[in-house]
Amino acid sequence: MTSTPRTRLSADQRRAQIAAAARELALAEGLAAVTLRAVASRVGVASGLVAHYVPSMDDLVADTFSDIVSAELAELATLLDAIDDSVERVRALLSTLLDGSRTDVTLVWVQSWAMGERNEVLAAAVRAHMDAWQGFIAGVLERGVDERMLRVEDPQAVAWLLLGMIDGLSAHGLVRWGEPAGRRALMARAIEPLLGLDAGSLADEREKSR
């Protein structure tokens, strides 16, 4: 009986395979699950082969984090860019990020803050992506100001406040504190005055119908 020879992967293909395995692990079990042994097991190779293609596990963890959170930001940017109304864009921002469907990415974020204390490569990536998210939210607010639908004196500062609230409420969701709709409604009510909006302006359709 003859055995089928394994296909030999190029260095780039192997690195892509390792990166994909790390991403799958992080989304399924959290960023802390991205270890040398776990990645090797998922790929189906020896740990030494993974170590050969990865500069360090700190780098792989940081790259995995960056891959996941940048993909989420790109997805959200595409979604909001298709919305013409400034208030509706903010409403969609809250609904998309606080609907309880992104606990896998939230866990990656939460673990990245803790793990970054001992992994400076990861910490640098976290800082860069927090800056990117803050800049994105500030852009949404500035666009609303330009369109005269929002009244925000300092969009950059308010964007940091919104980002912190989104992160905090999303983290609360990991331990099932409250319901997604309740967390979203809480934030909507809190930020309406910051955006110069009347009470109830950011309520979703289900809240308006009650």
Image (tube, rainbow, N blue to C red):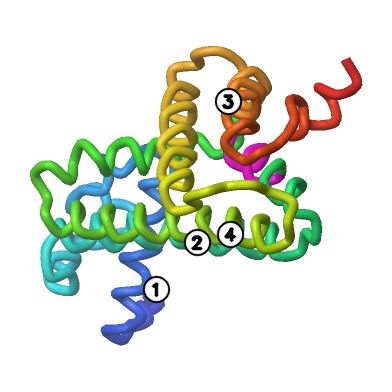
Disc nearer the start of the sequence (1/2) = 1
The residue type indicated by label 4 comes to Glu
Contact flag, marks 1 and 3 (Cβ < 8 Å):
no
Residue pointed to by mark 2: 71
208 or 20, nearer to the observer? 208
Question: Vertical placement of 84 versus 103: above or below?
Answer: below
Residue pointed to by mark 4: 142
The residue type indicated by label 1 comes to Met
Query: What's the residue at 57%, 47% (across, down)?
Result: 152
Q: Secondary structure at mark 4?
A: helix
* Quadrant (top left, top right, bottom left, bottom right) of the C terminus: top right
Disc nearer the start of the sequence (1/3) = 1
Residue pointed to by mark 1: 1
Question: Of the residues tagged 1 and 3, which is closer to the observer?
Answer: 3
Place of residue 10 in the rendered image (x, y in percent of width and height, measured from the top left)? 31, 86
Q: Disc 4 to disc 2, how far (Cα)?
A: 23 Å
**Residue 5 within the magenta-colored segment of the rendering:** no
